[in-house]
Amino acid sequence: MIILFTNPFGRDILTLQPGKKPKTFPEGSKNKRQTPEEVWKEETMKKNLAALVALSLLLTALIPSLALAAAAPATGRLMLYTSLPAMQLNMMVDMFNDQYPGVTVDVFSASSEDVMARARAEAGAPQGDLVLGGGLSAFQSAEDLLSAYATPNAKTFHEQYRNESAAFTPIQLHVSALIVNNVLARELGVKVVGWESLKDARLTGRLVYMDPSATSPDAQQAAFVNSFAKSVNVPSPSAPSFVLNAVTAGQYAVGIISEEKAIERKQSGADLGVVYAKEGIAMGASYAGILSGARNEANAKLFLDFITSREYQQAAADQLHQRSIRRDVDFGLKGIASTKELTALNYESLALLEVANAAAWNR
């Protein structure tokens, strides 16, 4: 930073020494005797010109080095321990490397349990830098393995996920939605608006669901959906593709499925309704955290900042139909609720509903 000091009165001060006469010129010259004010002006111009020349030389020397420092690219390596699906992971890494081509990203991909087991086995001397993917309970149990870091993007997160922990950061929201075959629902005379409406006797044998743990790492979300399905006599989950195809074809009237799968099918033109339960949404988040003692901590922070940026989060919403952790990113699709319109089932609500569902199942 360059600081220029100026006279508080707005101009340089020229003091004529006592007894010193103004500059004179030969008789007949077009120049006349200079007054003190003219001398002051001339001397000031000379001094200002000299100062400008000096400043120009200084800036010429400084600007290339400042520009070089600002443009210094990130380099080195980054090791990810992750349980994310390959499509999501590939998109993250590709977009990151487009922006930071000098960073080589290595990946250890496994289940969330295996990822955390490896991180714990390497505690104190980790080979990895960033744990990517996994639910709240998994990260809470591994908090002692992680280094505190607050991404500048946290200020844009939805309020309820903003300050969960200094050791891990939410990166995506997972929602369990209801897909409804509109034609069959009308034929049956049922209106699906939430969990309770799925207990309508006319839907007996017409409901199918996928285990949310196939797409969401949130244990509470998975426990609720599995428990509720049992309460309406659907004892076991089906594969996501079967749920989508069976409801689309009218074999079943309603399916409980991950939101991104429902959006993907609806975008293909299928006559399906996407319903968000009025009692509250089964919703959770996946997280990331920097391992304590990571050898490439700076690159891990860079990656975490990037995947929580608006650029990546909007791309994930647009291309993968993933719900963003950020308030300034949404789908903008007809029939798909914005995050601010959703009410998540809290832990107390989940516990009460699970008790009620278990009682109904045992009757």
Image (cartoon, helix red, strand yellow):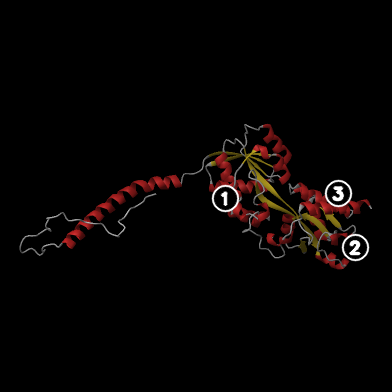
N-terminal of the two: label 2 or label 3? 2
The amino acid on which the numbered mark 2 sits, given as a three-letter code, is Arg
Identify the secondary structure beneath mark 3. Answer: loop
Seen as rendered, the residue at the extreme left is 27
Which residue is more in the foreground, 193 or 78?
A: 193
Residue wearing tag 3: 236
Give the residue at x 87% y 68%.
Answer: 189
Expressed as whole percent of the image width and height from the top left, the position of residue 179 reads 79, 60
**Residue 327's x, y, as percent?**
63, 58
Q: Residues within 10 Å of mark 3 (few under 14, many from 20)?
A: few
Instruction: Classify mark 2: residues with Cα within 10 Å, few (<14), some (14-19) or many (20+).
Output: few
Instruction: Classify residue 77 as left or right of residue 287.
Output: left
Q: Which mark is residue 152?
A: 1
Residue 140 visible in this rendered orientation of the protein? yes
> What type is the residue that disc 3 sits on?
Ser
Q: Is residue 217 left or right of residue 197?
A: left
| Foreground tag (2 vs 1) | 1
Distance from Cα at disc 2 to Cα at disc 3: 20 Å
* Label 1 crowd bin: few (<14), some (14–19), many (20+), radius 10 Å: few
Q: Earlier in the sequence, mark 3 or mark 1?
A: 1
- Which dot, 3 or 1, sits closer to the camera? 1
Read off the residue under disc 2.
202
